[in-house]
Amino acid sequence: MNNLLITPVVIPLLTGMVLIIFQKNIQLQKVLSLAALLATGVVSVLLINQIRNDGIQTLQLGGWEAPYGISFVGDMFSALLLLATSVVSAGCLLYAFPSIGRRQEKLYFYPLVLFLVTGVNGSFLTGDLFNLYVFFEVFLFASYVMISLGGTKRQLRESLKYIFTNIISSAFFLMGVAYLYSITGTLNLAHISIRIAEVGQDGLITTVAFLFLIVFALKAGLLLYFWLPGSYSVPPTAIAAIFAALLTKVGIYAIFRMFTLIFYHEPQITHLFIGILAAATMVLGGIGAIGYWDLRKILTYNVVLSVGFIMLGLVSFTHTGMMGSIYYLIHDMVIKALVFLIGGTIIHLTGTSNLKDSGGVIRLHPQLGWMFFIAALSMVGIPPLSGFLGKVFITQGAFASGYFWLGAVGLLASLCILYSMIKMFMNAFWGDRLLSEEEEKGTAKGLLLPIALLTIASLVLGIGAEGLAGYVAQAAEELLNPNLYIDAVFE
């Protein structure tokens, strides 16, 4: 029993509730919200060290033993994602301080960020299927409000699409929970795994597995991403960066958890289907990334593309491939927040998201230009930057498991990322136009610090990959051996 497991949920939740009371004291909201995220990051580091030394940590709420009570389970995979969430959220919050605007701050922006982080952290830690649904709804409710902050006509249109899609997805989620409970008689993830292993994954259970795959594919943007490009391109920059870095990643996490702990008995059916979805997602995401000239659309289609690529490690179901997916997932959380913040800053400075109408930003803001260049090379997977090791391991895992066609699609997707990022760099920062101080629509004051901090985090992930290797290897081993998770819950 480790009471530390509940703190990444309690800290942002209680802080957010307190901030609602102090709606008019914006300075206090800024300080407390940042402090809450930093405290959550510290707790995540402590959990990582405990899991590294003592194995998977569990907490049975209320003292009710599993499977009767609600379990919180912290393995290395979830703990690493907790730390990445804290780092990314803190960076986006720092960017929001000078940029989000007084009106949005008075509309409970800072409590909403903390409630969103509460839902994300809870999703990573819960060991109960129904509570996974509850935590999904917590961060989704916060995101419903955040996506509409600003109230423009385009925002309202895209927010309706986003909300309706997620309501339908949540209804299917509840149906899946009901079916699985009727079959197994339990909602505890570890207990469900035991029950399905006892009776075998028959056709009915495989059908339920596909139902959950549809739900989480909608959340993650795995092929079913029709809602994503519009929804992620309309909110203010700080909110779009949080969405791109965190929301699809919770869907990815849920797919990994369900298809390594519960639905892992028929990989030739379920995992192959995930591979087909991943390949289609990469192809379509790549076409969108290279085809558009709108900066926001290019970035959002790169989010779609990366979702497909991360799935390749799960499809390979090898230790190397799983390590690659975990590496790349952590890298992608940091790098997507970074490029969305840089992209939003370019739009803020030039007044346009059309690459054909922008250019010359590097003349007045060379630091911004070269930080984007580092981020672009990282996304492509150039060594020794953070995207390199993940891409190598994922590709190696795909080839080792015989999925040569998936590995080839992944490499083709990397070329699409390269083309789209170079197109952005050459047109936004160089180009024919020379941006003068008089032509600038805004100021970069206060915006470069969080961008620099996330750039440093990305560099640390790449250059310090050897120090991270042991933690990632342990996370991959725990995912591939569900008995480690089950034993920790029932010991």
Image: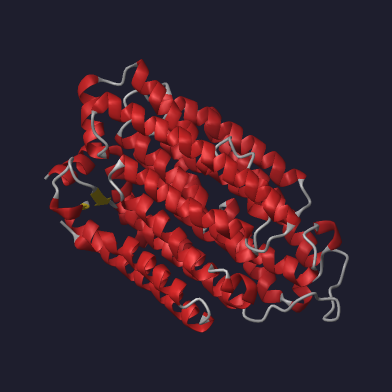
Say if residue 158 shows up in the picture: yes
The quadrant the N terminus occupies is bottom left
Q: In which image quadrant can residue 264 be found?
A: top left
Point out residue 412 in the picture as x, y percentages from the top left corner: 63, 38
Outermost front residue: 21
Give the residue furthest to the top.
203
Q: Horizontal and vertical percent for residue 247? A: 50, 51
Q: Single out the residue that lies furthest toward the right.
A: 432
Quarter of the image with the C terminus is top left
115 sits left or right of 69 in the view:
right
Whether residue 464 appears in this view of the structure is no
Which residue is rendered at x = 74% and y = 55% of the image? 153
**Residue 361 in which image quadrant:** bottom right
Asked whether, in this view, residue 194 is left or right of residue 8, the answer is left
Q: Is residue 145 above or below residue 103?
A: above
Q: Residue at x 65, y 59 (%)?
A: 235
Q: Nearer the viewer, residue 160 or 120?
A: 160
Closer to the camera, 475 or 236? 236
Q: Residue at x 17, y 41 (%)?
A: 68
Residue 212 percent across, percent down from the top left: 43, 32
Residue 302 at x, y percent in the picture: 63, 48
